[in-house]
Image (cartoon, helix red, strand yellow):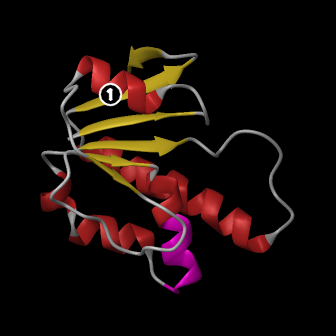
Amino acid sequence: MILIYGGAYQGKLDYALEHYNTNASVYQCNEIEIRIDFSKDIINSLHCLILAQLRNNMEPCQFINENREFLKPKIIICNDISCGVVPIDSEIRLWRESVGRVLTILARHADEVVRIFCGLGTRIK
């Protein structure tokens, strides 16, 4: 598994396609769907899936742990939403915490972890 994370609009997907596989198929997570299409090579915007799961009373960490084997051959891309002021809204605070916990699980099990800033990748694992 390769985990790519960084701020919004930093070029994470472009980086993944350029450095790993320009012909890769991409599953685009959104704030409605609570599952992943594991037939795709790249799982993009994982943070959106986490929000959808929270809104459907699911536990994102449990989902990730239960599906870790399916995620092993994938490139996973997620926004880092942990920076800045802690949100007042309880749903957004829970989302922020859940994204952090999921990224921790994924980073622990990933073969490679890359942080993207201004389109530049820094390999941290």
What residue range appears in magenta?
50-57
Counting from the top left corner in percent of width and height, residue 88 is at: 87, 64
Residue 65 in the image: x percent, y percent? 27, 66
Chief secondary structure of the magenta span? helix
For the residue carrying disc 1, how many other residues have a C-alpha within 10 Å: few (<14), some (14-19), or many (20+)?
many
Q: Residue at x 20, y 37 (%)?
A: 24
Residue 89 image point, x, y percent: 82, 68
Dot 1: what SS?
helix
**Closer-to-camera residue (101/54):** 54
Q: Is residue 8 left or right of residue 53?
A: right
Amino acid on which disc 1 is placed = Ala
Q: Residue at x 45, y 30 (%)?
A: 12
Q: Is residue 62 magenta?
A: no
Q: Residue furthest right?
A: 88
Residue that carries the numbered disc 1 in the rendered image: 16
Q: Report x, y in % for residue 48.
A: 52, 59
Kindly identify the residue that appears in the image at 19 percent across and 61 percent down.
38
- Quarter the C terminus occupies: top left
Which of 15 and 83 lies nearest the eye of the viewer? 15
- Which residue shows up at 44% across the image and 77% down it? 59
Vertical order, 66 against 86 (above or below): below
Assess whether residue 56 is covered by the magenta stretch: yes
